[in-house]
């Protein structure tokens, strides 16, 4: 069918970056626009071109989906709240004299390395320009932050005999962030 190769090339470009269900919905919209222009008397190639012009360049559509990505917004929120949660933990670990806790010697540097990797993943998601890398790094960053928060909470539960108020505050902050990261990760998993 004339004109459909223009649309299929357009959709192929979009499918390189966007989720399949989004591309299918855009394909339905493009087909409706093409049919509208056909009913107005345009030939098939002109109708396809008019429908594509109405939708805009693929790069513009992909950039808009990236900008509006929920995982991108979640990564930005986690980066923004990270210093607050980190300060809660710093206060709790200092007042709890964490340097005296019976932890394996490799645990502290490993935690630091993982934290740096997670921050990098979240920054890639928060400031990236392409939908798939933003989605993938954001999801990995949310999983990573969830694992770090879980590790902190479990470590404190095992290593510290008494709960002090700075520790309760830090655990609460991590638990809230953990729930947020889990919710975002599940949503992102369903939409990729």
Image (cartoon, grey):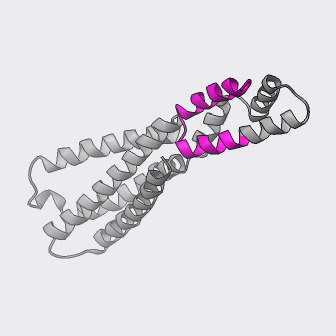
Residue extending farthest right: 40
Asked whether the viewer can see residue 19, the reply is yes
Residue extending farthest front: 1
User: Does the magenta-highlighted stretch encompass residue 84?
Assistant: no
How many numbered callouts?
Answer: 0
Q: Main secondary structure of the magenta part?
A: helix
Above or below: residue 42 compared with residue 93: above
- The x, y position of residue 29, in whole percent, is 72, 42
In the image, what residue occupies the spot 55% across and 38% down? Answer: 18
Q: Which residues are magenta?
A: 1-29
Q: Nearer the viewer, residue 154 or 52?
A: 52
- The x, y position of residue 53, in whole percent, is 78, 29
In the image, what residue occupies the spot 12% across and 61% down? Answer: 101
Q: Nearer the viewer, residue 173 or 142?
A: 142
In the image, what residue occupies the spot 31% across and 74% down? Answer: 165
- The x, y position of residue 54, in whole percent, is 79, 34
Asked whether the viewer can see residue 129, the reply is no
Quarter-of-image position of residue 171: bottom left
In the image, what residue occupies the spot 18% across and 76% down? Answer: 162
Quarter-of-image position of residue 136: top left
**Would you say 136 lies left or right of 54 here?**
left
- The x, y position of residue 47, in whole percent, is 81, 29
Quarter-of-image position of residue 50: top right
For the N terminus, the image quarter is: top right
**Would you say 21 lies left or right of 88 here?**
right
User: Does the magenta-highlighted stretch encompass residue 21?
Assistant: yes
Q: Nearer the viewer, residue 24 or 63?
A: 24
């Amino acid at each position: 069918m004339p004109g459909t190769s223009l649309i299929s090339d357009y959709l192929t470009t979009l499918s390189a970056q966007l989720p399949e269900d989004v591309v299918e919905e855009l394909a339905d919209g493009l087909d409706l626009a093409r049919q509208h222009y056909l009913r107005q008397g345009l030939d098939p190639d002109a109708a396809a071109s008019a429908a594509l012009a109405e939708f805009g360049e693929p790069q513009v559509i992909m950039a808009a989906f990236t900008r509006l990505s929920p995982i991108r917004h979640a990564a930005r929120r986690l980066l923004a709240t990270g210093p607050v949660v980190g300060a809660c933990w710093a206060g709790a670990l200092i007042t709890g004299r964490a340097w005296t806790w019976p932890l394996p010697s490799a645990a502290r540097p490993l935690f630091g390395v993982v934290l740096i990797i997670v921050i990098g993943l979240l920054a890639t998601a928060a400031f990236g320009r392409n939908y798939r890398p933003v989605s993938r790094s954001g999801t990995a960053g949310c999983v990573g932050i969830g694992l770090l928060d879980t590790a902190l909470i479990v470590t404190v539960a095992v290593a510290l005999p008494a709960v002090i108020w700075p520790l309760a505050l830090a655990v609460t902050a991590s638990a809230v962030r953990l729930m947020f990261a889990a919710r975002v990760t599940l949503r992102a998993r369903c939409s990729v």
